[in-house]
Amino acid sequence: MKHIIRYVLFLFLLVVAASPLPAQLDSIVKGILDHAASQSRQAPPQQRRSQTTQSSSRQSSNRQSKRPFDGTWLAAQAKTNPETQQMISRTFTMIIKEGKATKTLDSTNASSPDKPFYASIYELQRRWTYNSLDCTEQGTSLTIQWSPGQLSDWAPKTIPNPVVEGFGAPMAETSVYKLNGDELTRINDPNGLIYHRAK
C-alpha cells in the first residue's frame, strides 16, 4: 500500500511539475509568433518606400525622356568686332520647361582706349531677357521663336538709359537647336553657339 501511495504521489508531483512546461511552451511559441508578426508589419512600409522611390525615379526618367530639352542650358562666346575694335563677350542662360523657354544674354563690350563708350567709360555691361513665342520639338531638333530682347539691366549706371539703348538691342529671331546628349547646338548661328546642360 505504501508503494502505491508513493507511486501516486510521485505521479502527482510529476504532473504538477510538468504542467507548467506546456504553458511555458505556449508562451514561448506565442512570443515567437508575435515577434514574427511585428516584423512582417514593419517590412511593408520599407517595401512601400522602396517601391515609391523606384516609381518616382521611373517617373523622373520618363519625364526626362519625354522632355529631353527641359533644363537649364549655358553658353559663352567671345569675339572682336573688326569695325569698332571692340572686344565682345557674351554669356547665355536658357531655361526650357514644359514647352516654354526664357533666355538671358549678358554682354560685355570693351572699347579701345581712343574710343570710349561714354565720357571716360571703356566697358559697358548689358543684360537682355527674351521669352519664347513658340517652341517646337521634333526628335532631337528644337525650334524656338524668340521675342525681341528687352534691356533689363546695364552697368555702369552713369551711362543714361537712352545712350545704352542707342547701342542697339537684339531683334526677334528664330533659333534652331540640335540636341546631342548634354549639348544643345544652335545650328542656324554662323558662330555655331553650343549650350551645355547645367548640372
Image: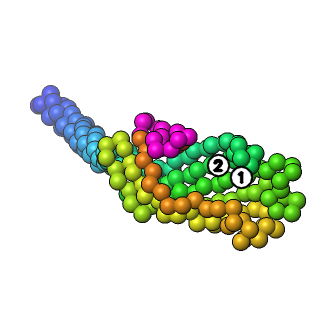
| Residue drawn at point x = 43 percent, y = 45 percent | 177
| Residue 147 seen | yes
Amino acid type indicated by mark 2: Arg
Say if mark 1 contacts mark 2, CB within 8 Å: yes
Q: Is residue 43 left or right of residue 92?
A: left
Quadrant position of residue 50: top left
Q: State yes or no: residue 181 in magenta.
A: yes
Is 196 rendered above or below residue 95?
Answer: above
Residue at the image point whose x is 12% and y is 31% from the top: 4
Kind of residue at badge 1: Thr
Q: Is residue 181 left or right of residue 161?
A: left
Q: Position of residue 118 (x, y in %)?
A: 82, 62
Asked whether residue 60 is in view, the answer is no
Q: CA distance from mark 1 to mark 2?
A: 6 Å
Task: State the extent of the magenta-drawn residues as a range.
Answer: 179-192
**Quadrant location, the N terminus:** top left
- For marks 1 and 2, the one nearer the N-term is 2
| Numbered disc 2: secondary structure | strand
Residue sitting nearer the eye, 168 or 199: 168
Provide residue 160's location: percent of width, then percent of height. 77, 71
Where is residue 173 shown, x and y percent of the image?
Answer: 48, 57
Disc 2 marks which residue? Answer: 90
Q: Residue at x 41, y 40 (%)?
A: 179
Q: State left or right for residue 6 relative to residue 112.
A: left
Residue at left offset 53%, top offset 41%: 190
Task: Please tell me whether residue 158 belongs to the stretch shown in magenta.
Answer: no
Left or right placement of residue 111 versus residue 138 in this view: right
For this rendering, which residue is in front, 56 or 141? 141
With respect to residue 91, does 29 lie above or below?
above
Q: Is residue 159 above or below residue 199?
A: below
**Badge 1, how many Cα within 10 Å: few under 14, some, many 20+?**
many
* Residue identified by numbered label 1: 108
